[in-house]
Image: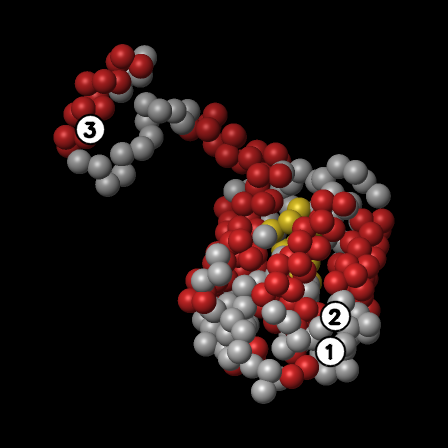
Amino acid sequence: MSLTRPTGPFRRMAVLGDSIAYGMCAARPEREWVQVAASLLRQFQDEPLRVMNRALPAGVISPRCPGYEESAKPSLIEHHHRHAIETAPDIIIIAEGLNDMRSGMPIKAFTEDLETIVIDIQRETQALVVLVGIYHQKFGCGANDPSELPIWTQWNHDLAWLYNEAISRTATKHNALFVDALAVLGGANWVLNPDCCHLNDLGHVLIGNALFQAIATACPGMAAKTLKNIEADEISVANTGGADTNEQIQAWWHAAAARFGVEL
């Protein structure tokens, strides 16, 4: 297992997780958080990026999860080798834990299974691993209404925070990246679909941007195209900026520029 992270750019991205990672309740495919992140990565690298979204709606992490019988199968621990190792990706996004939390899986058991998956991936590949934390949820309505879905509503917001912390610690322990989805969504109920569980377009875009930020700030290779463009186009303070300004601001700047050694 490598102790150093890949630096980018990236060519093959595999995504594992649940219905939100699958893209449910995004109004258009390009608004799915997976596609938002992929689009940004493509903008900032010359190499093409192939996305392999293998998230499974209603999936759980392993047969140990109390919601396993009601879940879509196979569980993540049963199919990650096929979809996150055999496909030879160089970046793997894992957004797992929401359904496990919602069906009452003990955090210790969940963390053990998540570590097993991460260790397996890192032993068999050189891929960058990114773990996405728990999404904000609204309890008591829609898909989080205990009277409607008793198996999938065995949680509270304190447990969500503890799950999120467990995923963060796992990322740190195994030199993976962590995207704090709870912090990104900020407890805002208006980033959710009316089902109180899945993200709407706004929520998806927030997660996609946060995922891109985590990758871009951890992987120096993501700046290669930008640095090349700076040199080729001679980009500087003298020839950039000013969109939507006005003549007065431009006049003030032109008057001051020489004091800063800027030739306009």
Closer to the N terminus: mark 1 or mark 2?
A: 1
**What is the spatial separation of the Cα atoms under label 2 and label 3, in whole angstroms?**
60 Å
What amino acid does circle 3 point to? Gln
Q: Quadrant of residue 9?
A: top right
Residue drawn at the location 50% of the way across and 34% of the way down:
226
| Left or right, residue 166 beside residue 213 | right
**What is the spatial separation of the Cα atoms under label 1 and label 3, in whole angstroms?**
62 Å
Q: Is residue 139 above or below residue 180?
A: below
Nearest the eye: 6 or 73: 73
User: What colour scheme governs how the chains and residues are painted in the rendered image of this protein?
Assistant: secondary structure
What is the quadrant of the C terminus in the image? Answer: top left
Residue marked by disc 1: 67
Residue drawn at the location 77% of the way across and 59% of the way down:
111
Residue 105 marker = 2
What amino acid does circle 2 point to? Met
- Please tell me whether mark 3 sits on a helix, a strand or a loop: helix
Outermost residue toward the front in this view: 158
What amino acid does circle 1 point to? Gly
Q: Is residue 26 visible?
A: no
CB of mark 1 within 8 Å of CB of mark 2?
yes
Residue 235: give x, y in percent of width and height: 40, 27
Closer to the N terminus: mark 1 or mark 3?
A: 1
Nearest the eye: 49 or 62: 62
Closer to the N terminus: mark 2 or mark 3?
A: 2
Q: Is residue 260 visible?
A: yes
Residue marked by disc 3: 250
**What is the spatial separation of the Cα atoms under label 1 and label 2, in whole angstroms?**
8 Å
Residue drawn at the location 60% of the way across and 82% of the way down:
146
Residue 178: give x, y in percent of width and height: 64, 49
Outermost residue toward the left in this view: 248
Residue drawn at the location 75% of the way across and 37% of the way down:
4
